């Protein structure tokens, strides 16, 4: 999301260095969520290793989001009234929920009820948190005021592209979370193929957003 970095002003070298760490964390985490759902990957490495890839990805997401919140807190003049700060805060909360869902995903032999409660529910609420965070970051990219936000920018800008790409990833994660619900009557995932596809595609959006931030720091 990188909402604190969406301004157009040139930033100090130390700030750029922190942004690179944030971009790297999101890039690694996104790569894990991109690879994990690919058909045949769990057959290649085993179900346990596949689940571990998701958990590792969530840890990198949390580390990057924590740095993002740190940067937003240090830079925000009015923390609780700043949309960028709230974007980072909600994003961090969402990554913690992904930590829970992917951690419980490491466990074998969970019942349908346990899977929905321990894995699906935190994943759903984490995706909702990401969606809120992405919408706030997108609004920040439109200018200094949260409302009214424009769907299209007045000028092409790398920060807008990053925010829009990340918001698309958040939407795809939300679709994936809904599709991942385990139907109690059948014990099967509601829509496995869309769940996997949207997870990978959403992760690809986050990866692109992280690369855009890294490229931007290289120019600062």
Image (cartoon, rainbow, N blue to C red):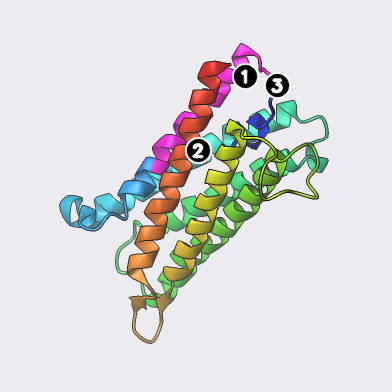
In the figure, is residue 112 to the left or right of 131? left
Disc number at residue 144?
none
Who's the residue at 79% across and 36% down the image? 144
Front label number (3 vs 1): 3
Q: Earlier in the sequence, mark 1 or mark 2?
A: 1
Residue at the spot of label 2: 209
Q: How many marks?
A: 3
Query: How many residues crowd around disc 1 within 10 Å: few (fewer than 14), some, or many (20 or more)?
Result: some
Residue 9 is tagged as: 3
Of helix, strand and loop, which mostly describes the magenta segment?
helix
Per the image, label 3 sits on a secondary structure element best described as loop
Q: In this orientation, does residue 37 appear?
A: yes
Residue in the image at 46% along x and 45% along y: 205
Q: Is residue 130 left or right of residue 204?
A: right
Note whether 187 is above or below 201 in the view shown.
Answer: below
Residue 213, image x, y percentages: 53, 30
- Label whose residue precedes the other's in the sequence (2 or 3): 3
User: Helix or strand or loop: what does disc 2 sit on?
Assistant: helix
Q: Residues within 10 Å of mark 2 (few under 14, many from 20)?
A: many
* Residue 42 in magenta stretch: no
Density class for disc 3 (Cα within 10 Å; few <14, some 14-19, many ≥20) is few
Residue 133, image x, y percentages: 64, 49
Give the residue number, with chain letter if any, for mark 1.
Answer: 15
Q: Nearer the viewer, residue 214 or 90?
A: 214
Q: Secondary structure at mark 1?
A: helix
Residue 37 x/y as whole percent: 32, 55
């Amino acid at each position: 999301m990188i909402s604190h970095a969406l301004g157009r002003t040139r930033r100090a070298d130390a700030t750029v260095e922190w942004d690179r760490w944030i971009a790297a964390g999101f890039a690694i985490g996104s790569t894990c969520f991109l690879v994990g759902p690919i058909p045949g990957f769990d057959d290649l490495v085993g179900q346990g290793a596949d689940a571990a890839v998701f958990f590792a990805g969530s840890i990198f997401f949390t580390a990057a989001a924590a740095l993002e919140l740190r940067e937003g807190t240090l830079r925000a003049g009015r923390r609780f009234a700043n949309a960028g700060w709230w974007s980072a805060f909600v994003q961090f909360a969402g990554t913690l929920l992904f930590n829970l869902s992917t951690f419980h995903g490491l466990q074998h032999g969970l019942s349908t009820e346990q899977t929905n409660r321990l894995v699906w529910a935190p994943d759903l609420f984490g995706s909702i948190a990401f969606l809120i965070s992405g919408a706030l970051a997108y609004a920040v990219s439109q200018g200094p005021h949260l409302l009214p936000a424009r769907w299209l920018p007045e000028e092409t800008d790398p920060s807008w592209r990053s925010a829009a790409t990340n918001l698309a990833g958040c939407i795809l994660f939300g679709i994936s979370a809904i599709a991942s619900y385990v139907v109690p009557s059948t014990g099967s995932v509601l829509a496995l193929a869309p769940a996997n596809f949207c997870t990978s595609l959403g992760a690809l959006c986050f990866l692109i957003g992280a690369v855009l931030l890294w490229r931007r720091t290289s120019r600062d």
